[in-house]
Image (cartoon, grey):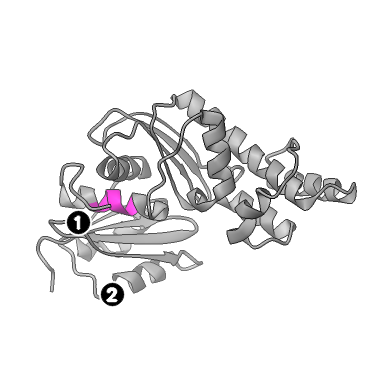
C-alpha cells in the first residue's frame, strides 16, 4: 500500500546508501547501509516496508536505481541539487556546502532557497576523499574511526608531497623508516587532504557559513584543520551522511526549504 503524503529520498554512494522518508512534518524514518558489491540488493533491503508516494534518487547509482525500481515512481536529481536542498533546509543561512565522501569531494556555492550559483566536484580520483583516509589509516594500522583523533596527537606538522594513494603510502613508509612518529605522519596526511580541499573551496568561492557534510565530516582532525585555515567554525549536521538523501526527499515532496526538522 502506498502512503499518500510520504516521500522518500535515497542517496546511492560508492561507500554507503542513505534513505530518508518524509511526511508533511519532517523526517519519519532514516537508515544507512554499506553499498557493498550489490548496491541494488542493498537498496531493495532498505526499501522493504517503505511505502512512499514518490522516491527521488541521487548519488552515483541513481540512474541504475531508477531503472531497477521504475515501478516505484522514481525521479532522479544530481548530488549537487540534493546537497544544496538538504543544506538549505537545515541551515537557511548556509553560503557554501562542502561534502567529502568516500570517493568524491563536492563544493557548492549557494544563493539561497536551495539554488546553486557555482560548484566543483572531484570525482575522477579518490585522492583527498574518505577512501584515501581509509587506505592511509590501514597503512598506519589505525582503525579508520580513530584516525582523526589519533592524528591530533601529533607534535609537529610535516609535509606529504603526494596525494596519489600509492605514492603517499610509499612516502609514509619512508618517513616511518626514518623514525618519524606515526601521529605526525597521520597529521601530514590530513593536512594534504585539507590543502586539496581548500584549493577547491577557493576556486568556487567561500561564502560563510560553510556546511560540512559527508562521511569525512565525522573526522575531528579534518574539521579542526579546515576551521583553522578558514578562520571560522564549520556547521556540521547531526547526521552529515544523510544530507543528500534529505535533499532528495525534499525534492520528492516539493516542499520549500526550512520545513524539515533537523
> Badge 2 is on which residue?
48
Helix, strand or loop: magenta stretch: helix
**Disc 1 versus disc 2: nearer the observer:** 1
Name the spot of residue 179 as percent of width and height, x first: 88, 49
Q: Is residue 27 left or right of residue 100?
A: left
Cβ atoms under marks 1 and 2 closer than 8 Å: no
Image coordinates of residue 33 in percent, x first then y, are 42, 67
Q: Position of residue 229 (x, y in %)?
A: 56, 30
Per the image, the residue denoted by label 1 is 26
Q: Quadrant of the N terminus?
A: bottom left
Q: Look at 32% across and 61% down and name the residue there.
A: 19
Residue density around tag 2, few if under 14, some if 14–19, many if 20 or more, within 10 Å: few
- Residue 74 in view, yes or no: yes
SS at circle 2:
loop
Q: Residue at x 16, y 52 (%)?
A: 253
- Is residue 233 placed above or below 247 in the rendered structure? above
Compared across the picture, whether 219 is left or right of 74 comes to: right
State the residue lying farthest toward the right. Answer: 178
Label 1, secondary structure: give it.
loop
Residue depicted at x 28% and y 45%: 90
State the image coordinates of residue 13 (x, y, percent, origin top left).
44, 55
Q: Please tell me how crowded label 1 is: few (under 14), some (14-19), or many (20+) other residues with Cα within 10 Å.
A: some
Residue 101 vs residue 192: left or right? left
Q: Please state the extent of the stretch shown in magenta in the rendering.
A: 244-249
Decide which of 198, 227 is in the foreground and name it: 227
How many dots with numbers?
Answer: 2
103 or 37, nearer to the observer: 103
Q: Earlier in the sequence, mark 1 or mark 2?
A: 1
Quadrant housing residue 53:
bottom left
Quarter residue 119 falls in: top left
Query: Is-magenta flag for residue 8?
Result: no
Amino acid at each position: 500500500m502506498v502512503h499518500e503524503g510520504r516521500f522518500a529520498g535515497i542517496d546511492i554512494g560508492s561507500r554507503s546508501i542513505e534513505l530518508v522518508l518524509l511526511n508533511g512534518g519532517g523526517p519519519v524514518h532514516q537508515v544507512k547501509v554499506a553499498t557493498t558489491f550489490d548496491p541494488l540488493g542493498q537498496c531493495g533491503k532498505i526499501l522493504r516496508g517503505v511505502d512512499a508516494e514518490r522516491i527521488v534518487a541521487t548519488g552515483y547509482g541513481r540512474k541504475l536505481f531508477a531503472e531497477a525500481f521504475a515501478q516505484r515512481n522514481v525521479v532522479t536529481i544530481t548530488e549537487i541539487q540534493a546537497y544544496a536542498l538538504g543544506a538549505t533546509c537545515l541551515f537557511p543561512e548556509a553560503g557554501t556546502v562542502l561534502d567529502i565522501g568516500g570517493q568524491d569531494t563536492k563544493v557548492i556555492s549557494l544563493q539561497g532557497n536551495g539554488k546553486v550559483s557555482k560548484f566543483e566536484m572531484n570525482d575522477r580520483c579518490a585522492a583527498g576523499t574518505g577512501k584515501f583516509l581509509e587506505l592511509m589509516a590501514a597503512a598506519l594500522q589505525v582503525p579508520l574511526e580513530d584516525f582523526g583523533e589519533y592524528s591530533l596527537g601529533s607534535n609537529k606538522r610535516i609535509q606529504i608531497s603526494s596525494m596519489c594513494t600509492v605514492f603517499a603510502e610509499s612516502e609514509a613508509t619512508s618517513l616511518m623508516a626514518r623514525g618519524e612518529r606515526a601521529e605526525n605522519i597521520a597529521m601530514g596526511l590530513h593536512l594534504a587532504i585539507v590543502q586539496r580541499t581548500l584549493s577547491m573551496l577557493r576556486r568556487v568561492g567561500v561564502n560563510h557559513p560553510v556546511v560540512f557534510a559527508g562521511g569525512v565530516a565525522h573526522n575531528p582532525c579534518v574539521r579542526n584543520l579546515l576551521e583553522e585555515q578558514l578562520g571560522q567554525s564549520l556547521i556540521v549536521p547531526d547526521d552529515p551522511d544523510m544530507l543528500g538523501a534529505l535533499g532528495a526527499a525534499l525534492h520528492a515532496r516539493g516542499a520549500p526549504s526550512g520545513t524539515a526538522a533537523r
